[in-house]
Amino acid sequence: MSRYETNVVLYRLKKDAAFRDRFRADPRRALADADLTDEEREAFVRWDARKLNDLGGLLHLLISIPGLSAH
């Protein structure tokens, strides 16, 4: 499990609008270069905020990503 990389992706989703748009369009492709476990990757693809939090994603980041926090 990569708690650090999970939070790097969450931070990018929060701060990088172009990355966020790519993620919305095709999450698997947007995450292709991310060093995530299969479990983390699937949680992102499904946008399972509870699972991401359980895997170490910071709650503050999870609830503050424009257009995804309530997704």
Image (cartoon, rainbow, N blue to C red):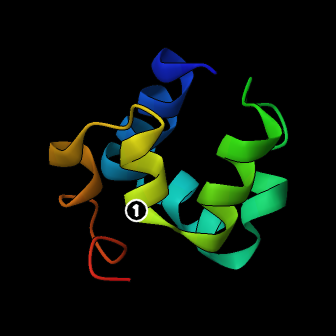
Q: Position of residue 32 (x, y in %)?
A: 84, 42
Q: Is residue 47 visible?
A: yes
- Compared across the picture, whether 20 is left or right of 54 comes to right
Q: Residue 66 placed where, x, y %?
A: 27, 68
Res. 70 image quadrant: bottom left
Residue 31 appears in the rendering: no
Q: Residue at x 37, y 37 (%)?
A: 57
Residue 17, position in %: x, y?
42, 58
Compared across the picture, whether 58 is left or right of 33 comes to left
Give the residue at mark 1. 49
Q: Secondary structure at mark 1?
A: helix
Q: How many marks?
A: 1
Q: Residue at x 31, y 44 (%)?
A: 15
Q: Residue at x 70, y 77 (%)?
A: 25
Apparent side of residue 17 relative to residue 14 in the rendered image (left or right): right
Quarter of the image where the C terminus is located: bottom left
Locate residue 24 relative to residue 63 in the image: left or right: right
Identity, as a three-letter code, of the amino acid under mark 1? Ala
Q: Quadrant of the N terminus?
A: top right
Could you tell me which residue is drawn at 55 percent across and 68 percent down? 21
Q: Is residue 48 above or below residue 3?
A: below
- The picture quadrant where one finds residue 28 is bottom right
Q: Count residues near mark 1 (Cα–Cα under 10 Å), then give few for <14, some for 14-19, many for 20+.
A: many
Q: Nearer the viewer, residue 13 or 69?
A: 69
